[in-house]
Image (tube, rainbow, N blue to C red):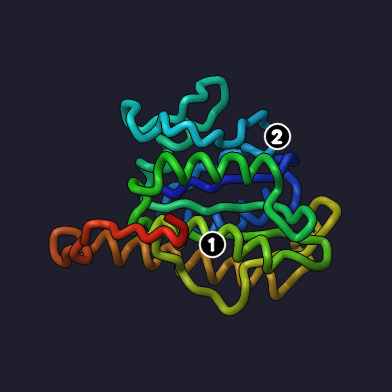
Amino acid sequence: MKVIAINGSPRKNGNTGQALQLMADELKKEGIEVEIIQIGHKNIHGCIACGHCFTSEQNQCVFKDDILNEVAAKMREADGFILGSPTYYAGIAGTMKSFLDRVFYTSSGYFKYKVATSVAVVRRAGGVDVVHQLNNYLNLAQTVTPPSQYWTVGYGRSEGEVHQDGEGIQTLRKNARAMAWLLKVIDASKGKIPFPIEEERVMTNFIR
């Protein structure tokens, strides 16, 4: 089994990257392969709502000059994924937001019932808002989210300070172990327990 971890920080080895690495280490102890992909330093377009991905082969995004389609393919293929972002003004970092808007618009149909979780890193306040924003993508894509003892937020400003947040680090470890357990449960159920029955999507617009 494999998990893709997305680092939305512009700093590869900053606190967000180190939080993701800690979770990756826990998953690896359970025999699960993890690939961490840093996108926070890349030049990534925002979605322009052109609809190209609805009709293109393999639902690819119209923009071919950034890494979105490449990373989306890896996330579709993986058994699960982790979204990690620093906290910018109590929100997701800008490049990460552009990435998420496009990857979930093109690929949510491929993510259903995958195991997915999120982590935010913050200096002081706003981290819970970021976790909620990240989880909005996971919820609407109908992923299965592992639990933990608290919100998956790590505290720290200077590189490495997140490791001084004992409760935060424990929360992330427990979340990663729960993710590994869920991955194994879902894998063991394949061919034995069918997914829930699907219904045709009903769309209700409030303004017609």
What kind of residue is marked 2?
A: His
Q: On the image, numbered disc 2 is attached to which residue?
A: 41
Which quadrant holds residue 163? Answer: bottom right
| Residue 114 appearing in the image | yes
Is residue 159 toward the left or the right of residue 188 in the image?
Answer: right
Check the image and report above or below for 51 versus 176.
above
- In primary-sequence order, the first of circles 2 and 1 is 2
In the rendered image, residue 166, in percent from the top left (x then y), is placed at 73, 72
Residue closest to the far bottom: 149
Is residue 17 toward the left or the right of residue 142 in the image?
Answer: right
For image coordinates 63% across by 46% down, the residue present is: 97
For image coordinates 43% across by 33% down, the residue present is: 51
Q: On the image, numbered disc 1 is attached to which residue?
A: 135
- Where disc 1 sits, the SS reads helix
- Where disc 2 sits, the SS reads loop
What is the CA distance from the residue labelled 2 to the residue labelled 1?
22 Å
For image coordinates 54% across by 71% down, the residue present is: 174
Check the image and report above or below for 46 versus 66.
below
What kind of residue is marked 1?
A: Asn
Is residue 104 toward the left or the right of residue 167 in the image?
Answer: left
Q: Residues within 10 Å of mark 2 (few under 14, many from 20)?
A: some
Q: Quadrant of the C terminus?
A: bottom left
Foreground pick, 38 / 55: 55
Check the image and report above or below for 148 versus 42.
below
Q: Nearer the viewer, mark 2 or mark 1?
A: 1
